[in-house]
Image (tube, rainbow, N blue to C red):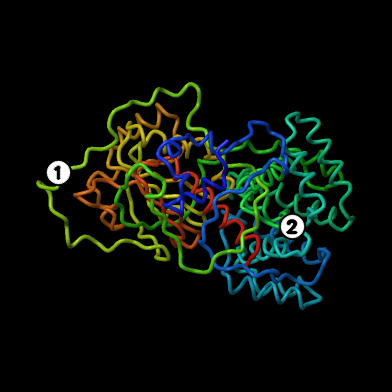
Amino acid sequence: MFPVSTFVNSLFNPSSPQNSHSQNKRSLNSIFCFSKKKEFKPESLRRSLSLPILKKAPSTPPRPSQSKPNQQIVESICSLIETHGLNVEGIFRISGGAAKVKKLREALQNSGSPETVLQGYIDNIHDIASTLKLYFRELPNPIIPFSHYVPILTAQNESDEEKRNMDIRQLLSQLPPENQTVLSRLMSLLYRISCSHAVNKMTINNLSIVWGPSLMRPEKPTLDLIYEIRVQCQFVETLLNNFSFFFPNSSVPIVTPPSSIPLHEEGSESKSESEPEQEPENQLANSTTTTTTTPELDLPVGTGIGLPTSIGLPNDPPIPQSPEVVVKSSQSLKRNSESPKEVKVGDKAPNFSLPKADGSVVSLSNFIGKRVVLFFYPKDFTPGCIVENKTFRDNYELFQYANCEIVGISSDSPQCHADFSRKYNIPFSLLSDADNSVRKQYGIYSLLTGPARITFIINENGTVVHSYKSLLQPQEHIIHSLTAIAQLLMNETLNPL
């Protein structure tokens, strides 16, 4: 099989003898092996692309010296949220102010009376909720200890529900007593919040995305977090959907769990940025990648599942073999010298508002509190664009569990997007930029080269952290997107605040 290391090297080494035309035409499935099995098998995992997009993480993340969870702090915060925050919209999803959260965290650690400290912050329940999340993330050994990490993931991936629940309950019974107490208290709070989801908008799906990475993490994080985080979140879903089974001694009244809402229906936030585009020959070496100039993370060799790369489902309509894009003649067009400056990595993504398939308007500012993959593509129903959209579609769940939304933009009409989405089962928003105003706003519109195929990765603060352009290699955009989001997850794990 074509070695992954050779493929990765060829991306950044144009002179590599392996970077031949025939090898470049290999499908993703022949390059990356993605197991269809549901079991979590660490020994079968592979290394994925490493992109230098984040600040250098400390070799030893600064975490509190306290090795055991403080039951008094957890009980005080949970009680206060139950009293004042059950019906607050976006509880745990909306972040508190970083400075206030840090100050509250330090005050709680240095005080013998958490209740007294919390009274001074009661006016902003989001600061208190964010402090609880941070408290769990900063534990030197998580509530689900490192020793239980792989066994829990393996149990969660069991296909038989009854066996899965029994295995998980057995593993939870092996936790240290203080961990069992704290986990039970937290789950009681989350269960009560989920029962009020009609008011606070926090379904079990929403809560699992927030709390999966807060309750468990690998001892040595790698890029495989993009795959593991899905199982982390599903573990929390399992606990909440079977609350009485796992926590029979809880005093919380048991009601019918709220029905799950599809992940892609949630609102969220983010921003995006872009880069110039000039499509090269049909060679990986000519694809252009732009990253931040900040120091590169010291990324360990991955031990995670290889990139999922299915290009389509068996029942997908055949991909037409028509030309991808017709480039306008340079003799009849002239370059616009007054076009806006290109948006660069490190810039804030300009906001925009565009109609989607159903005619409603979507703004980038709608995606508050989320990461965003924003990809510009040439045209619906053309071969490369079908491949690109389907690779994002087939891996959409991974992005959702990573608290990331996908947004596609082309100049097609909303009706065309509706037909395209219906034919290929596209779950994310496709927006209509009919006059190319957003392309111009991002500085990537050119009369000479035609519409670009470019993808921007935007963090929760609305800053572009990575961009990738390649017109003739549409399948590469999913690889760069998954890897960039995985690095953001790594950075969040190593630097909780």
Q: Which residue lies furthest to the left in this view?
A: 332
**Disc 1 vs disc 2: which is toward the camera?**
1
The residue drawn where x is 38% and y is 41% is 430
Residue wearing tag 2: 219
Seen from the viewer's position, the closer of residues 55 and 420 is 55
Residue 378: image x %, image y %? 30, 41
Rendering coords of residue 270 (x, y %): 46, 56
The C terminus is located in which quarter?
A: bottom right
Crowd around label 1: few <14 · some 14–19 · many ≥20 (10 Å) = few
Q: Which mark is residue 50?
A: none
Residue 493 location, x and y as percent?
Answer: 65, 60
Whole-Å distance between the Cαs marked 1 and 2?
A: 56 Å
Amino acid beneath label 2 = Glu
Mark sitting on residue 329: 1
Q: Is mark 1 on a helix, strand or loop?
A: loop
* Drawn side of residue 153 relative to residue 272, left or right: right
Residue displayed at 28% across by 38% down: 412
Instruction: Name the residue nearer the viewer: 340 or 15.
Output: 15
- Amino acid type of disc 1? Ser
Q: Residue lying farthest front?
A: 17
Q: In this view, does 353 lie to the left or right of 407?
A: left
Specify whether 476 is left or right of 154: left
Q: Position of residue 114 (x, y in %)?
A: 76, 71
The residue lying at 83 percent from left, 37 percent from top is 167
Residue count near mark 2 (Cα–Cα under 10 Å), binned few <14, some 14–19, many ≥20: few
Query: Upstream in the sequence, badge 1 or badge 2?
Result: 2
Image quadrant occupied by the N terminus: top right
